Amino acid sequence: MKSFHQFDGKKDVRAWLFTIAKNTYFTHYKKQKRVINMEGNSALKDVQLVNYLMNEEQALVIHRFLHAMEEPYKEVFSLRTFGELSFEAIGHLFGKSDGWARVTYYRAKKKITAYMEAKQNEGY
C-alpha cells in the first residue's frame, strides 16, 4: 500500500495487488530457502571432511581417491583445499568463472564425502 501512488490505473487494481503479493511470496520463499540450506547438511559434511583429513589413515584414503578422481575435480579440490586458493583464482586459472570453481569444488567434495562414507560403512 506504500506504493499505491505509483499505480497507473491502466490495469485492474486486483491484478496489480496480486502481482505484488506473488513477488513478495517468492522473495520470502527464496530467503527461507537460503536459511534452510545454510543450516542444513552442508556444514555437517564440511566438518566430516575436515575430520577425515585430520586422521592420518583416512587422509591417505582420501589422497588415493583424489589421485584417481577425474579432472577438473581433482585439481580444483586440491587447489582449494591444499593450495588455499580462492574460487576466483581457481576460476581464473581454468579460464572459467568463480561460480564454476565453486560448483566444481562442491561436486568434488560431495564425491569424496560419499566415498568416505561408503568406506566407513565397509569398515575399512
Image (cartoon, helix red, strand yellow):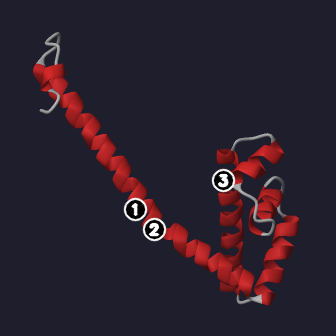
Looking at the image, tell me whether mark 3 or mark 2 is earlier in sequence order.
2
Secondary structure category for the residue under label 2: loop
Amino acid type, mark 2: Gly
Can residue 118 be seen here? The reply is yes
Q: Residue at x 12, y 32 (%)?
A: 1
Amino acid type, mark 3: Arg
User: Disc 3 versus disc 1: distance between alpha carbons?
Assistant: 19 Å
Q: Mark 2 = which residue? A: 40
Q: Residues within 10 Å of mark 2 (few under 14, many from 20)?
A: few
Q: Mark 1 = which residue? A: 36
Q: Residue at x 70, y 42 (%)?
A: 97
Task: Tell me if 12 is positioned left or right of 123 in this view.
Answer: left
Looking at the image, tell me whether mark 3 or mark 1 is earlier in sequence order.
1
Task: Tell me if 53 is positioned left or right of 43 in this view.
Answer: right
**Quarter of the rendering occupied by the C terminus:** bottom right
Determine whether label 1 and label 2 are within 8 Å by CB.
Answer: yes
On residue 102, which mark appears? 3
User: Disc 1 versus disc 2: distance between alpha carbons?
Assistant: 6 Å
Looking at the picture, tell me which residue is in the foreground, 84 or 73: 84
Image coordinates for residue 81, horizontal then vertical, percent: 75, 68
Secondary structure category for the residue under label 1: helix
On residue 99, which mark appears? none
In the image, residue 10 above or below residue 97: above
Image coordinates for residue 119, horizontal then vertical, percent: 72, 81
Task: Tell me if 93 is positioned left or right of 99 in this view.
Answer: right
Q: Residues within 10 Å of mark 1 (few under 14, many from 20)?
A: few
Task: Name the front one of labels 3 and 2.
Answer: 3
Q: In which image quadrant can residue 95 be found?
A: top right
Secondary structure category for the residue under label 3: helix
Amino acid type, mark 1: Ile
Q: Residue at x 71, y 90 (%)?
A: 123
Q: In which image quadrant can residue 105 be found?
A: bottom right
